[in-house]
Image (cartoon, rainbow, N blue to C red):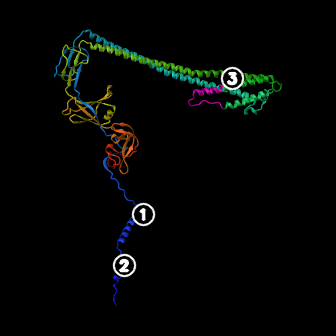
Amino acid sequence: MKKKNWRNIWLKKKPAFFTWRNTEIFAGSLLLFAIVFRFFAGGEAPEEVAEIRQKETEIIVFGTWVPDAEREILATLESSGDVDIKADIAGTMAQVLVNIGDRVSKNQFLARFQLEDDSTQATYENALRNLEAVRMSGINTVRSAEITLETAERELEQTRLTQEQTKKQVFEKLRTQSVNSETTASNALDWADRILGASEKFQFRQDANDVTRQHIGSNNTVKRQELKNTVRLLVSEKKTLSMIPSFRPTDEDYFHFAEERLDFLRSMQTIVREIDSLIRQTHLSSTKFTETDRSTFQTEAENFSSGMDAAILSLESQFETAKTQEQSKELSILTSENKVENARAALELAKVTSASQIATAENTLRSARTGQADLEIRAPFSGKVTDKKVSAFQQVQSGDTLFSLVAGEITPRVTAYVTSDELQRIESSEEIQIKFPNDGIVTVRIPNLSSKTDPGSQKIRVEFPLDEFPPNTLVGSFARLILPSVKNGNRRLLPISAVSFEPDGAEVLILNEKHIAERRKVEYRRILGDGIEISGGLESGDRVVRYRSRVHAGEKIKYQSSMNNDQ
């Protein structure tokens, strides 16, 4: 049996696969599959990104920058030993005793003015004696005025003490009178209360005398009831009378205390008079209210009325005395104070007058001194004569230069005139650098400061002593003081180089999270030296481009921090 070839049979039955049509279908399927896969994967075709330029520059973290700029001040190199000797007065030189190049010692005669009339010496001595006399007279006058002032001040203190004691006594007497008047009024109130039976104290008390008292006003019950109600009200008001505070009572406390007692007295005086009238109108009875009873009660009423009249008069008098005492105290103290002020004014006048008299005497003495017969020019220190501008018999005016003298030891120094701000920088620095024309730099420490401001330039003179003259530098040469910056503690500063002043306002460049430069509008308050104070638009920690003109918005920045901040 013939064996079958299965491979040939399969190949014959299998259709052709790699045809042109099948290839196109396969390629289209692959493309469709790629599109569907990209859609369900959520991806999009990447857009073409423009290349971002990158620059390297300095960045300032806002809130950390401190000005570090230095300032230069023009100064002059001088010699401390070269001095011009000038004439103090006008006159004729009689002798000139030195020449250029001579060495002189301190106080040595250099020249003499011409001898004039001998009477000038007498005038000088008289002026000197007059000055001493005026000084002694002024001292005595001022001391006398001081004694008068001291006496007036003691009298003022004594017046205050005396018036205070007197016032205390008057007000204490007012308090005593008020208490006594209250006692008088209280006794009269008890008498009226007993007659009328107004309060609980006497309302239910029954004895033989009470029966007689109850008969008073029996023929006028309406009047009796009115008086009874008034007495009951006064009994209640008496309990509410104010007291004087025990700690530092005022004048008003005393017056209020006395006024209440005075009103209480006057009210009781009216009650007593009304009861007296009621007693007189009560009908007599042989058993209940006899003539003797009426006479007894009338006598009691009159006694109470007289006592209250006296108490009212006494209290009113003391009340007025207390009122006038305060006025008297103020008047006495004011009089003493005026004496003190007058004595003080007299003392000031004595001082001014004495000073004026002394000044006049000093001027007279000064004029006499300038006219002395023998006037001499002396060397202020030992040294060498470097210039002579006067000769014998020459006429000179006050202020003319006669000689120039240089000391044996010459000390160099650098002088400058500075503003108050520059002086603050100098005083806050431990050392200052001085730069000379030959590029030499000297470091100095403590300067000598002038105690006053130049009225013309409104600047202050400062001197920096040097140990020696800088090499190849002449006296009179200009130098420069290098002043360090001042640390003022302001944390809202930026260097001016970081700010651009545009037509619509100031702006800076800051870095965003991707280190891309962005424009930011800012507000500023003032310019301080080489810095500008930012008042709005920036927050602490914002990264600001230090040199605004070197970077454009949109550029990527590779930066270095100017304050050692982390990149």
Which numbered disc, 2 or 3, marks the residue closer to the eye?
A: 2
- Left or right side of 360 for 235: right
Which of the marked residues, 2 or 1, is nearer the chain's N terminus?
2
x, y percent for residue 314: 64, 21
Q: In the image shown, does 401 or 151 lie closer to the viewer?
A: 401
x, y percent for residue 556: 33, 50
Q: Amino acid at mark 3?
A: Met
In the rendered image, the quadrant that contains the N terminus is: bottom left
Location of residue 417 (image quadrant): top left
Residue span colored magenta: 240-262
Badges 3 and 1: C-beta atoms under 8 Å apart?
Answer: no
From the image, tell me which residue sits under label 3: 308
x, y percent for residue 419: 32, 31
Q: Amino acid at mark 1?
A: Phe
Q: Secondary structure at mark 1?
A: helix
**With respect to residue 286, does 433 lie above or below?**
below
From the image, tell me which residue sits under label 2: 14
Alpha-carbon span between mark 3 and mark 1: 120 Å
Alpha-carbon span between mark 2 and mark 3: 156 Å
In the rendered structure, does residue 375 fall within the stretch colored magenta? no
From the image, tell me which residue sits under label 1: 40
Tell which residue pokes out farthest to the right in this image: 286
